[in-house]
Amino acid sequence: MPGTAGSVFRIRLILAVNHDTHFKGWAKPGPVARGAAGPSIVPAGQTLDALSGHFRIYQLREGHRFSTDDVLTAWYGTSWAASVRRVLDLGSGIGSVGMIAAWRLAGASFVTVEAQEESVALARKSADYNGLSDRYEIRQGDFRDKEILSGDELFDLVLGSPPYFPIGTGIEGDHPQKVACRFELRGDITDYARVAAAHLATGGTFACVFPEEQRDRVEGGARAAALAIARRRPVVFREGEPPMIELFAMMRAADLPERMRNRTWVEPPLIIRAADGSIHPEYAAVKLAIGFPP
């Protein structure tokens, strides 16, 4: 736009590498993303980053960016859901959890719900780049609003990476997108559990991540929503340290035999990095399972 000051209108052109089949000796699995067929325009202030296999994701350079928590949520949910045709991603942000799951569940259809307009716009660009638009519906709004999801919409898998902290309990950050991803501006873990339970198909799974030190909040939210925590797995970011977060897989208590409704299988901790700082062998295997380089 000639004569306009500022960088908001400036773009830079990134040329996709059509034959980029390997990365540091690792063969990228899965289909080649539609966007890789030609040049991709990335506006200033955004990046286009590798995700599962050939998938990529648009992110703000200074905003919220996907994390290990998101990667693990997608892996855990897609690993332990019994049979998946339809997936719901609550508070989906820029789409990292949902798109990793969509890469792994190539035959499933998705509905994602996100309130922040900026995050929704990025997610839609990423879905188009990855060729997901025909099975990946992105809805903008607060998932607590009854108008967002109709009562008869049921899903075999519900995913959630909720914000971890009540408002006023920490430093909120320097970008509005980051604040909403870290602090409970639009619902807490109890709201995630309640909405998940209301839209789980028979035998469906709700998978989420939350700080290990706040496990009592997850357990309270599950009870309030009549969900049973079928299994959980602590996550240790460096060998020898205490777990920081925990992964949870829940089902409606009514879908389980009575003996399992108050019984949780606690898995051994998943270690991200060994004591020497290298990627732990099991986490390398986890990354391979969701199309990430080990």
Image (cartoon, grey):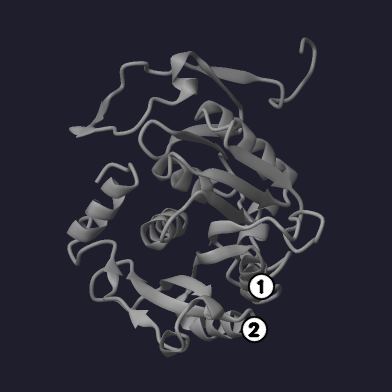
Q: Which mark is residue 224?
A: 2
Q: Which mark is residue 14?
A: none
- The residue indicated by pointer 1 is 194
Residue 24 visible? The answer is no
Residue 270 visible? The answer is yes
> Mark 1 is on which residue type?
Arg
Residue 31 found in image quarter: top left
The x, y position of residue 15, in whole percent, is 45, 15
| Element type where label 2 sits in the image | helix
Q: Is residue 115 left or right of residue 18?
A: right
The residue drawn where x is 71% and y is 27% is 8
The residue drawn where x is 68% and y is 51% is 114
Nearest the eye: 1 or 200: 200
> Mark 2 is on which residue type?
Ala
The residue drawn where x is 47% and y is 43% is 102
Near mark 2 (Cα within 10 A), the count class, few <14, some 14-19 or many ≥20, is some
Is the C-beta separation of discs 2 and 1 under 8 Å? yes
Residue 192 found in image quarter: bottom right
Q: Is residue 134 above or below residue 195?
A: above
The x, y position of residue 229, in whole percent, is 47, 78
